Amino acid sequence: MSGIRLTNVSKSFGALKVIHGVDIEIEQGEFAVFVGPSGCGKSTLLRMIAGLEETSGGKIAIEGEDVTHREASKRGVAMVFQSYALYPHLSVYENMAFSLTIGRRPKAEIERKVKAAAEILRLGEYLNHKPSQLSGGQRQRVAIGRAIVREPRVFLFDEPLSNLDAELRVRMRMEIARLHRQIGATMVYVTHDQVEAMTLADKIIVLKAGLVQQIGAPLELYRNPANMFVAGFIGSPGMNFLKGRALAANGNALRVALEDAPGQAFDLPARTAVAVGTQVYVGVRPEHIELGARQGAVTVPVTAEFIEELGGTGYLHVLTGNGTEMTVECRDGRPQPKEKISLSLRVPEMLAFDTEGGRLS
């Protein structure tokens, strides 16, 4: 059953159109993540689902019911914001119970729901504390608990971890993933952090300038990006892109040579016809590059610039002869800055794109 369906949804602020005819389907119980750079429209879409922004065009349905023009309070959704928005003078219990209290729910029902949510979120010992006595992660859990007690059909998260430090972000990602497994509700999560998207999502919706670029499972987007934007955005560090030329093309193969590796033509499986001499971009991920020359690979001479040392792994930043920046994952060996080295690019892992960013292979 569909949890949320957006059909040709658009949004304009006056003459400025920010969402352009978006079609998205999220299954009931799925964890979906809207991801993209700042200004791509992901938070606007979330607020439209919540009923906090009017829809300029199209239809929004939740569990089969058209809620496009329904009031926010009647959509059966609960939203967790970037700011915790807790009442500082109320206890954790009172904050979590607030919506039920103003809704005049029976005291026994409020107590049952708050204690059940506190148990799920491991907040039982803090119910009498004030928000000022809690850590950032605990405050965010209280905000999530306030959503849980409402028993919504859909949970909406708008960059809920942005105010936390790096360690707390990792811990809270695990908390949210555990929560989803435990309660099985439909969840929609907005972030600009593709690592959050990859680690949390059942389904990722990649957005750019108010348009959906690709929808799919995390590893599907990583392994089979629809275009150059998705290829560069999904994965950390992002994919490297090198300029090249199409030397030959037929229905099955595209023969390419890189500007930084003259005389080393190689074949990639062709998705579409390409004219000989056409400029292309070839993408290869940092983990698909090796230090030194390797048989069967494309060798590119580069100059080492600096390395991000992470212990067992390092990320080496280099410059090609044409000044193109590349990132290489290193597990063995660490070249010195300004050292001249060779890189081996694995041909089976490469992807080709046209100058507009469309997939060619």
Image (tube, rainbow, N blue to C red):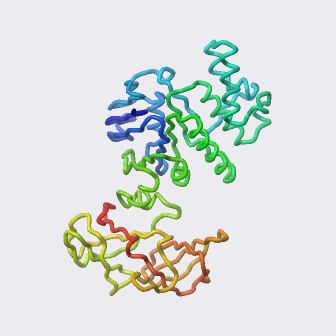
For the point 62% across and 45% down, which residue is it?
161
Q: Is residue 168 above or below residue 180?
A: below
Height in image: 251 above or below 82?
below
- The image quarter containing residue 255 is bottom left
Q: Nearer the viewer, residue 349 or 233?
A: 349
Please, is residue 40 above or below residue 333 in the view? above
Query: Considering only vertical position in the picture, is 163 above or below 2?
Result: below
Q: Quadrant of the C terminus?
A: bottom left
Pinpoint residue 333: horizontal percent, then vertical percent: 61, 81
Q: Is residue 78 rendered to the left or right of residue 45?
A: right
Number of disc labels: 0
Horizontal side of 78 relative to 246 (left or right) equals right
Residue 248, horizontal then vertical, whole percent: 22, 77
Image check: 99 left or right of 215?
right
The quadrant of the image that shows the N terminus is top left
Q: Position of residue 111 (x, y in %)?
A: 70, 20
Task: Give coordinates of residue 40: x percent, y percent.
Answer: 44, 47
**Viewer-proximal residue among 297 and 14:** 297
For the point 39% across and 81% down, the residue is 260
Q: Residue at x 36, y 46 (%)?
A: 211
